[in-house]
Amino acid sequence: GIEGRNMLFTNKARGNFAKDPAVVKLNGIYYLYYSIMLPGNKFGVGIATSADMEQWENIGEVPLEEEYEKNGIAAPGAIVLQDEVHLFYQTYGNWREDAICHAVSKDGVHFVKNASNPVFSPSKEWCCGRAIDADVCIFDGKLYLYFATRDKEMKIQKIGGACAELDSGFGKDAWAELALHTLLEPELPWEGECIEAPATLVRNGKIYMFYGGSYNCTPQQIGCAV
């Protein structure tokens, strides 16, 4: 069982704001990457560590260094490959132009950003071209990337996907879209006009995707697709 009542985490230095968690284990230590609120209502990505997933210590932030990050970054997804943390995060505050970036770290804290960032945005053939809320998993010998996007009218939020070879470096030229259409979109009454924030795991040859259905407090609830 999970005793969640004692597993509280926030960032007091950033206005007690913490959301969009992604956790990986590297060299026996758990690393938590999450969205934080920076001055000027700009989003960033914080880093915390834990030995037991109960007591967490904030140890840093992913710096905003590049022109494409000037309006902020958010919603990290993370995976460990060959003893390195690969972080997939979105640019923020650019509406239709937000896209997925990639960075890699040997120690879980200091990241080298991909020279071709942003590394992925979907074809405008089937959506608005935006990509946010990245999550990744290994499936069928490749890295699968799932993301939220919107229709061309910027009204309906939905899920798309892409994949890359594990030895590709995950740059802009590495990605192939899984399909030139939506993989998952609102269909059920409780999903409203939004499916977003995919979180995936692989079990017994299947990908299980947990997602947020309906926008924000309308209310937003969690669903699962396989």
Image (cartoon, grey):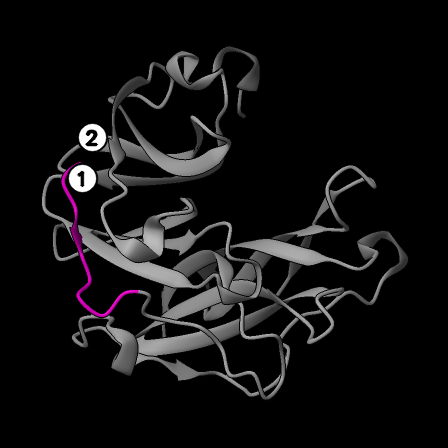
How many other residues sit within 10 Å of disc 1, few (<14), some (14-19) or many (≥20)? Answer: many
Left or right: 51 with respect to 210? left
The part of the image, by quadrant, that contains residue 126 is bottom right
Q: Amino acid at mark 1?
A: Gly
The x, y position of residue 75, in whole percent, is 45, 46
Between 161 and 129, the one lying in front of the other is 129
User: Could you say whether the residue bearing mark 2 is in a helix, strand or loop?
Assistant: strand
The part of the image, by quadrant, that contains residue 21 is top left
Q: Quadrant of the C terminus?
A: bottom right
Alpha carbon separation for disc pair 1 and 2:
9 Å
Instruction: Select label 1 or label 2 by which is in front.
Output: 1
Q: Residue placed at 61% from the left, 74% from the top?
A: 128
Q: Which residue is mark 2?
A: 29
Q: Residue placed at 42% from the left, 54% from the top?
A: 90
Q: Which residues are magenta?
A: 108-117
Q: Which residue is mark 1?
A: 108
Q: Residue placed at 56% from the left, 88% from the top?
A: 180
The x, y position of residue 207, in whole percent, is 51, 66
> Contact (CB < 8 A) between labels 1 and 2?
yes
Left or right: 43 with respect to 195? left
Rendered position, 127 above or below 179: above
Between 32 and 44, the one lying in front of the other is 44
Q: Amino acid at mark 2?
A: Ile
Q: Quadrant of the N terminus?
A: top right
User: Could you say whether the residue bearing mark 1 is in a helix, strand or loop?
Assistant: loop
Q: Main secondary structure of the magenta part?
A: loop
Rendered position, 226 above or below 201: below
Magenta stretch: includes residue 94: no
